[in-house]
Image: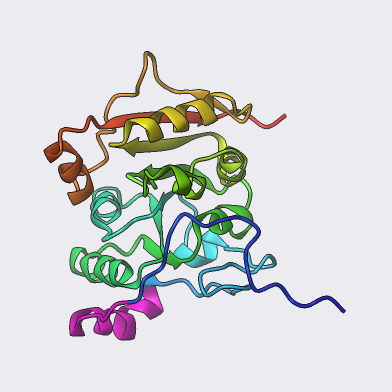
Amino acid sequence: MPEPRTFRDEPVSFVRRSGRMSEAQERAFDELAPFYLLEVPRAIASTSVHTDARLDPAATYGRTAPLIVEIGSGQGHAIVSAASARPEDDFLAVEVFRAGLARTMLDADKAGARNLRLAEANAPEVLSPFLPAGAAAEVWIFFPDPWHKKRHTKRRLVRTGFPQTAASALADGGLLRLATDWEDYALQMREVLDEAPEFERAFEGEWAERFEGRVMTAFERKGIAKGRDIRDLTYRRVARS
């Protein structure tokens, strides 16, 4: 019998570091996680998703509404703000760093954002197969880790093969919104998505206009402070044949 695998077939776009959480963050997991944090069946790794696991959005949110998924939600500033401003929509934050998840739950609870859930898991495994095909109205990827050293670029989230994963989660006509302050990553994103038959540009010119629904976060401020241009991209999911 072959030995069970103890690794993933593809490199992940993060390095998970453990750190001590504050009392408030610990409280978030004790008191708020039962509502906000999804129970994700695991496969190999602690951030993996079992291939048989499926999310039922209607059961999870208690209604049928457009679902917006943010990949790499960090401290949750963007998605908590959006969920608070758009109570008619449902939101899913995907993040692997527990301190960020805790901060998101605390802020969501304070804002009364009951239309938000969190998944502590590797993003591609959430997009497919955990999310049912076509479940998401939009997928957001704002300021993903650029992995700017040449030997590390293979870890970038948006690379060859990723468009098919994102396309699986998106409904026909759904939007994939991206932003980065790293020019070479922006160029890579655009090249990869332009070549993907599942997507078409939803912008004119070189870059998309800044997404008005994205609040200014520390990542964006940091990029601006360092003199880097912020580049947005928006792609539309082509109708399935």
Find residue 211 and report its image quarter: top left
Question: Mostly what secondary structure, the magenta segment?
Answer: helix
In the rendered structure, the answer to whether residue 125 lies left or right of residue 153 reads right
| Residue 207 visible here | yes
In the rendered structure, the answer to whether residue 202 lies left or right of residue 172 reads left
Find residue 30 and report its image quarter: bottom left
- The span picked out in magenta is 19-35
Whether 72 is drawn above or below 110: the answer is: above
Find residue 80 and report its image quarter: bottom left
Q: Residue at 39% across / 14% down in the picture?
A: 204
Quadrant location of the N terminus in the rendered image: bottom right
Q: Residue furthest right?
A: 1
Where does the image place residue 47, in percent across and percent down from the top left? 51, 69
* Front in this rendered view, residue 76 or 84: 76
Quadrant location of the C terminus in the rendered image: top right
Q: Residue at 38% across / 75% down in the picture?
A: 35
Where does the image place residue 142, in percent across and percent down from the top left? 34, 44
Q: Residue furthest top?
A: 205
Whether 39 is drawn above or below 15: the answer is: below
* Front in this rendered view, residue 86 or 208: 208
Whether 13 is drawn above or below 45: the answer is: above
Residue 26 part of the magenta-drawn span: yes
Where does the image place residue 6, in percent across and percent down from the top left? 65, 74
Where does the image place residue 151, in percent across and percent down from the top left? 47, 47
